[in-house]
Image (cartoon, rainbow, N blue to C red):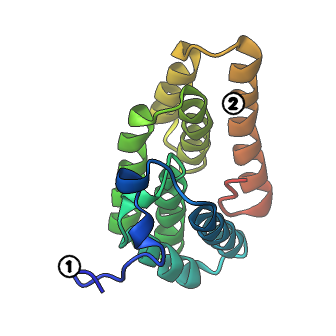
């Protein structure tokens, strides 16, 4: 348990600051958590997803790379699924504030596409267009930008056909 009351990450002694890189075992734990939370969200088991994501978000986010945006987006979807709009909005804001600070340009585009799709599903077209514009400004090949736009379209399409958010 940390001084703030949260649980220590199982591999807290392997921090990036002291070892320069994330160990494979921590990457595996993080990917398992992201995969499980995505599955729970896609099964509309929002309560279980919130429990899992809250635990991850209560840990030191330095142990997460750019994929921490997935934690925030997932938490936003799960909280909204439970009807907690204030928490959903806070997690969405965390995601949107994080995207422009990511280290990898490709990841900025990837997560901007996810944000754009989610915003469209939630009827926030003007905000979605801002993220589309960011994709257009990134220094990536046009084909890559096109794939990001396709991801946005698939999120909207699949969410509409399922009647619930599908972040894919």
Tell me if label 1 and label 2 are in contact, CB under 8 Å.
no
- Residue at the location (50% across, 50% down)? 21
Horizontal arrangement in the rendering, residue 3 relative to residue 60 (left or right): left
Horizontal arrangement in the rendering, residue 96 relative to residue 5 (left or right): right
**Where residue 22 sits in the image (x, y, percent)?**
52, 55
**Where residue 141 sits in the image (x, y, percent)?**
70, 13
Q: Quadrant of residue 136?
A: top right
- SS assignment at label 1: loop
Q: Quadrant of residue 23?
A: bottom right
Question: Along the line of sight, which residue is nearer the eye, 31 or 76?
Answer: 31
Structural crowding at the residue carrying mark 2, measured as other residues with C-alpha within 10 Å and reported as few (<14), some (14–19) or many (≥20): many
Sequence-wise, the earlier of marks 1 and 2 is 1
Horizontal arrangement in the rendering, residue 54 relative to residue 143 (left or right): left
Question: Along the line of sight, which residue is nearer the eye, 16 or 92?
Answer: 16
- Residue at the location (69% across, 67% down)? 35
Indicate whether 81 appears above or below 104: below
Indicate whether 99 appears above or below 75: above
Q: Residue furthest left?
A: 3
- SS assignment at label 2: helix
- Residue at the location (44% across, 48% down)? 20
**In this rendering, the label closer to the viewer, 1 or 2:** 1
According to the picture, the residue beneath numbered tag 2 turns out to be 148
According to the picture, the residue beneath numbered tag 1 turns out to be 4
Distance from the alpha carbon under mark 1 to that under mark 2: 38 Å
């Amino acid at each position: 348990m940390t001084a703030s009351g949260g649980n220590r990450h199982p591999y807290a002694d392997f921090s990036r600051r002291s070892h320069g890189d994330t160990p494979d075992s921590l990457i595996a734990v993080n990917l398992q958590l992201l995969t499980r939370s995505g599955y729970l969200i896609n099964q509309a088991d929002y309560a279980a997803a919130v429990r899992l994501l809250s635990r991850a978000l209560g840990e030191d986010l330095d142990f997460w790379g750019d994929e921490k945006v997935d934690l925030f987006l997932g938490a936003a979807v799960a909280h909204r699924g439970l009807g907690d709009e204030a928490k959903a909005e806070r997690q969405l804001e965390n995601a949107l504030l994080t995207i422009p600070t990511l280290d990898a340009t490709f990841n900025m585009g990837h997560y901007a596409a996810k944000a754009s799709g989610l915003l469209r599903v939630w009827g926030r077209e003007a905000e979605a267009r801002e993220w589309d514009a960011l994709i257009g400004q990134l220094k990536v090949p046009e084909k890559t930008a096109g794939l990001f736009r396709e991801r946005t379209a698939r999120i909207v399409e699949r969410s509409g056909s399922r009647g619930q958010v599908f972040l894919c």
